[in-house]
């Protein structure tokens, strides 16, 4: 899929080798699914209506995505679905902004889905441990080898009330798009006072590195 959509993926940092674990990333575009999916052997946690999308909905179903409702009243059910996948040994990829941004900044991470990090999982040796959470920063930095300026990022980012079909059509004609992905050191809830502090840490490291990637000075 990276070749079909013209996506060049540049990777920094090391992926966590433990399974299961949570991968936490900022969210910019449907291209995120292709880029992260080409790197992480895991399943996406996605909003329920993505299952109805053309192309990407089929991809999401084929990749065993967990489809959840984003209503506050559905948080418990979503958390239980995620926990079931983790108990089965699956690595899950989540976008805790709960929406996509414009590619210039990271929206605040919502801590509700980090509740799953409070539970224990069993590894392949039958040992109980805290779930590892690996923050990941993602940024679209180049188009056809040239720096992708602020004015061009809306052609890549899909957010707000943009219609999927027209946006995808125009994005497909742009050329080769470079996405830079940084894997940060994994952490667990035990490293923090509570899940909100864990969410704030992930927000900070992802936000800081994304700004550095966009400026061409990654700190990873």
Image (cartoon, grey):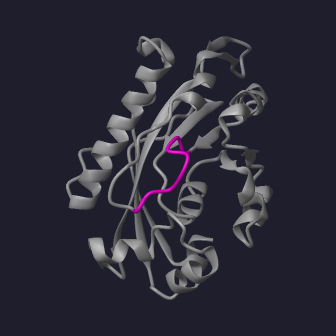
Q: The N terminus is located in which quarter?
A: bottom right
Q: Where is residue 186, by image quadrant?
A: top left
Residue found 50% across the figure and 56% down from its top: 100
Location of residue 122 in the rendering, given as x and y in whole percent from the top left corner: 71, 17
Segment colored magenta: 95-102
Location of residue 125 in the rendering, given as x and y in whole percent from the top left corner: 71, 17
Visible residue check, residue 98: yes
Query: Horizontal placement of 42 versus 106: left or right?
Result: right
Location of residue 198 in the rendering, given as x and y in whole percent from the top left corner: 44, 23
Q: Is residue 23 above or below residue 112?
A: below
Residue found 78% across the figure and 49% down from its top: 64
Residue found 52% across the figure and 40% down from its top: 96
Most foreground residue, 16 or 201 = 201
Q: Main secondary structure of the magenta part?
A: loop
Q: Is residue 189 above or below residue 102?
A: above
Q: Where is residue 81, by image quadrant?
A: top right
Location of residue 118 in the rendering, given as x and y in whole percent from the top left corner: 59, 16
Q: Is residue 88 above or below residue 98?
A: above
Query: Horizontal placement of 37 versus 152: left or right?
Result: right
Q: The C terminus is located in which quarter?
A: top left
Most foreground residue, 19 or 102 = 102
Query: Horizontal placement of 140 versus 117: left or right?
Result: left
Residue found 59% across the figure and 23% down from its top: 115
């Amino acid at each position: 899929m990276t070749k079909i959509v013209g996506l060049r993926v540049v990777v920094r940092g090391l992926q966590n080798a433990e399974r299961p674990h949570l991968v936490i990333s900022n969210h910019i575009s449907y291209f995120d699914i292709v880029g992260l999916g080409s790197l992480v052997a895991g399943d996406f946690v996605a909003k329920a209506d993505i299952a109805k999308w053309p192309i990407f909905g089929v991809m999401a179903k084929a990749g065993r995505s967990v489809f959840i409702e984003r209503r506050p009243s559905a948080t418990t059910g979503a958390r239980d679905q995620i926990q079931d996948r983790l108990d089965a040994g699956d690595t899950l990829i989540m976008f805790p902004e709960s929406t996509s941004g414009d590619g210039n900044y990271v929206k605040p991470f919502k801590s509700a889905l980090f509740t799953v990090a409070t539970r224990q999982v069993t590894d392949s040796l039958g040992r109980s441990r805290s779930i590892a959470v690996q923050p990941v920063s993602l940024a679209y930095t180049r188009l056809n080898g040239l720096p992708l300026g602020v004015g061009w990022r809306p052609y890549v980012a899909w957010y707000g009330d943009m219609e999927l079909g027209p946006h995808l059509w125009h994005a497909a004609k742009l050329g080769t798009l470079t996405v830079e992905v940084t894997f940060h050191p994994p952490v667990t809830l035990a490293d923090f006072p509570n899940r909100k502090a864990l969410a704030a840490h992930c927000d900070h490291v992802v936000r800081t590195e994304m700004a550095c990637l966009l400026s061409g000075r990654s700190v990873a």
